[in-house]
Image (cartoon, rainbow, N blue to C red):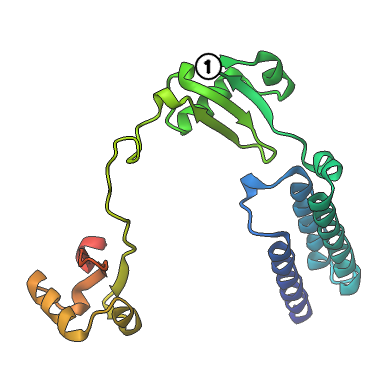
Amino acid sequence: MFISYIRSMILYLLLILAVRLMGKRQIGELEPAEFVVAILIADLASVPMQDIGIPLLSGVLPILTVLAIELILSVLSMRFRRVRRFLSGNPILLMQDGKILVENLVKTRLTVDELIQHLRERNILDLSTVQYAILEVDGQISAIVHPLHQPPTARDLQAEPAAAELPVAVISDGVVLEERLAAAGRDRRWLEDQLHRFGCRAEEVFLLTTTPSGKLYLARREAAR
């Protein structure tokens, strides 16, 4: 049992290293070649985990081989367009100027209902407003709404909106974060004044954030449960 535990830990750490080397992608964003590699590595790791009669090196070497091939192909796909097209394919146009390109839809084996669902997920209900809908190489559908149907920007309205401010948490789960308090340009006295204004103690606060302009957000611990 102890040997099996050690083997599992080694293979687990090796899989984490392999995923880190492959890059940070969500499962739904993997390209075909990366998806195949992920399946192969998981399958190769499961065999030596379950059968301690197989030498650990016999399980590690295939994983390292597949990972090495993936890294080599990644470098080649970055340098050579033909390799990239072979491994990942090309984006396919599904809609243009509000018209569904049925031939491309059939080629990608997508139904109209699936296309409409993807557009709804992007808050697009009127198909006539879609300038382009594209099936990307990772399987996601990108949709670009015609400029006439897009909401105006601040530049279009000749307005000058205030810059976005990043809130800094100074209390989290009842604990005062001294380093973040100092980073926000605040001190303990300021914090005590704010807590007095809200009528609570630090231990009663689930989250307290502040922005450079002084905008506060406070959530009490009992309200967060």
Across and down, in percent, residue 56 comes to 86, 73
Label 1 Cα neighbours within 10 Å, binned few <14 / some 14-19 / many ≥20: some
Residue closer to the observer: 111 or 3: 111
Across and down, in percent, residue 221 comes to 23, 68
Residue closer to the observer: 173 or 167: 167
Query: In the image, is 151 to the left or to the right of 147?
Result: left
- Write the residue at 74% across / 81% down: 2
- Write the residue at 85% across / 44% down: 83
Q: Quadrant of the C terminus?
A: bottom left
- Write the residue at 91% across / 69% down: 58
Residue 172 seen in the current view: no
Query: In the image, is 136 to the left or to the right of 166?
Result: right
Name above or below for residue 99 compared with residue 185: above
Location of residue 150 by image quarter: top left
Location of residue 44 by image quarter: bottom right
Query: In the image, is 27 to the left or to the right of 35?
Result: left
Q: How many numbered marks does the figure carry? A: 1
Across and down, in percent, residue 213 comes to 22, 66
Query: In the image, is 70 to the left or to the right of 23?
Result: right
Q: Residue furthest front?
A: 158
- Write the residue at 73% across / 60% down: 22
Q: Which residue is mark 1?
A: 98
Looking at the rendered structure, the secondary structure element under dot 1 is loop
Residue closer to the observer: 140 or 158: 158
Residue type at mark 1? Gly
Name above or below for residue 129 compared with residue 57: above
Q: Quadrant of the N terminus?
A: bottom right
Residue 196 seen in the current view: yes
Name above or below for residue 69 compared with residue 29: below
Residue closer to the observer: 142 or 206: 142
Location of residue 207 by image quarter: bottom left
